[in-house]
Image (cartoon, rainbow, N blue to C red):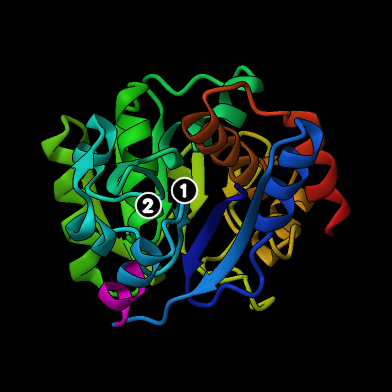
Amino acid sequence: MVKTFAVIGDPIEHSLSPSIHNAAFKALNLDCTYIAYRIPRGELKEGIESLRQIKISGFNVTIPHKIEMMQYLDEASAECKVIGATNTVSNDNGKFTGYNTDMDGFLEPIKKRNIGISGESVLVLGSGGAARAIVAGFVKEGAKKITISNRTLQKAQDLAEFASDLGAEADSITLQNVDVSKYKFVINATSVGLKNEPSPISTNAINANHVVYDIIYMPMNTDLIQQSKKNSATIIYGYEMLLGQAALAFQIWHKVQAPYEAMKKVLLGGF
């Protein structure tokens, strides 16, 4: 009996998750398959019903459904409840349990580089489900100050309030008013860059003291990354978070260590 897994979102055709997970199944000889399933905004309820009907074994959740998906879970992990967003769901005999592997998947490449977070200030661009997980991760690791910047100020304010509730010093500003010189970490959690658009903020003041992390993984070198590289910043790529969260999701579903190198190889081959 082949087990089926999926990633749901909209748009979804650019997703590299099927390649990554199918490579992992092959590496470990698992009788499983992983597909991309487009569920348009506003149709999540019907989409989840159809996943229940085909007895999906588990699925990942991406833009724009990470927050709304919380309503359709039977149970949620502790991180999931704190963050208020889910990106990984397992189906145990019809019971949908939500997890959030975005937070630790995001933190992993920072830790791999031995970059300290405690006491540092952070600028997060964006305020969706991924941004919530990122903020929760920074608070967990002891960041001193978190500033949220977003096109819609109200959404930035909501996320800053979320960070304050978790115990961080937090504020919000519009994208036009960003002064990067105040921060060590600059994180892009918006979708600006997916279509090769210019960076959402000016990169003129970025220098060797900055850590610039763009969670967009396709294209690998967004405008923000390219400009920050020229200015000698430490760069963390979106594909590293993608791999980190995928490996954790794999472990939740299969209860075994993910074949990280096999997943990385196919992912980098996809560029």
Q: Amino acid at mark 2?
A: Ala
Q: Horizontally, is 148 left or right of 197 in the view?
A: left
For mark 1, does the 10 Å Cα neighbourhood hold few (<14), some (14 to 19), or many (20 or more) residues? many
* Position of residue 130 in the picture relative to residue 217 (left or right): left
Query: What x and y, as percent, mark residue 91?
Result: 37, 45
Residue 52 or 81: which is nearer the viewer? 52
In the picture, the quarter occupied by the C terminus is bottom right
Q: Secondary structure at mark 2?
A: helix
Question: At x 56% / y 36%, what residue is drawn?
Answer: 250
Among all residues in the image, which is located at the extreme front?
Answer: 1
Element on which disc 1 rests: loop
Q: Relative to 138, say whether 191 is above or below.
A: below
Residue displayed at 37% across by 32% down: 138
Disc number for residue 57? 1
Where is residue 80 shown, x and y percent of the image? 27, 40
Say what amino acid the circle numbered 1 marks.
Ser
Q: Is residue 46 magenta?
A: yes
Q: Which residues are magenta?
A: 43-48
Residue of label 2: 131
Nearest to N terminus: mark 1 or mark 2: 1
